[in-house]
Image: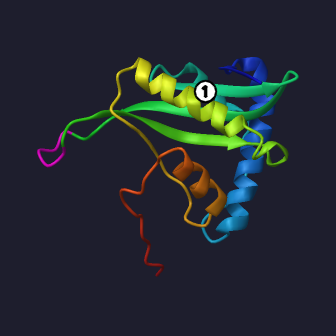
Amino acid sequence: MEVRLAAFDDIESICRLYDEFFAYNANLQPKYWNAGKEHGDYSKSIIKDGNSDLFVAAEDDKVIGLLHIKKMKTPPYDAYVPHEYAEIVDLITTAACRKKGAGSVLMAEAKQWAEARNLNYIELTVLSDAKDAIRFYEKKDFITVSHTMRNPL
């Protein structure tokens, strides 16, 4: 399995991954997610962004996963201890390739990326209904530090 920075030639494969991800989220939380379509504009913007990177995991020249990671900084409030950190915006693998190591390889890339930039930690958001994803992240030493709560009106 190869992990590399995404290129414009990967856009079509990346769009398919995002479409699968959107459908998965819509199935978990149909009240908040649609099975939308990624047409490439978002993916291209990540590739061009100087504070983000988009990595793909490929096997036999087929893209089977992606990692969108971004450098972040805590807000300039006195109450925050200042930190620079990495945010995993998206970590996606195709359903057919889950539990076969692609996510672990992408997570290792995220750690290397953050360490190379001397960042303090890696942060991500995961849907509370995505139990398999939560177990995966917990196995990778992620801990819950806050909860997002909603009060539907």
Left or right side of 55 for 141: left
Horizontal and vertical percent position of residue 115: 42, 23
Magenta part of the protein: which range? 76-80
Is residue 112 visible in the rendered image? The answer is: yes
Horizontal and vertical percent position of residue 119: 35, 27
Left or right side of 21 for 129: left
Q: Magenta residues: mostly which secondary structure?
A: loop
Left or right side of 82 for 103: right
Circle 1 SS class = strand
Residue at 68% across, 21% down: 6
Quarter of the image that includes the N terminus: top right
Residue at the extreme left: 78
Residue at the extreme right: 60
Q: Is residue 45 above or below residue 30?
A: above
Q: Residues within 10 Å of mark 1 (few under 14, many from 20)?
A: many
Q: How many marks?
A: 1
Residue at the extreme bottom: 153
Is residue 42 visible in the rendered image? The answer is: no
Horizontal and vertical percent position of residue 70: 47, 31
Q: What colouring style does the render use?
A: rainbow
| Residue that carries the numbered disc 1 in the rendered image | 54
Left or right side of 8 for 112: left
Query: Within the image, what quadrant is residue 93 found in?
Result: top right
Q: Is residue 74 above or below residue 62?
A: below
Residue at 59% across, 41% down: 90
Q: Does the magenta run of residues contain 148? A: no
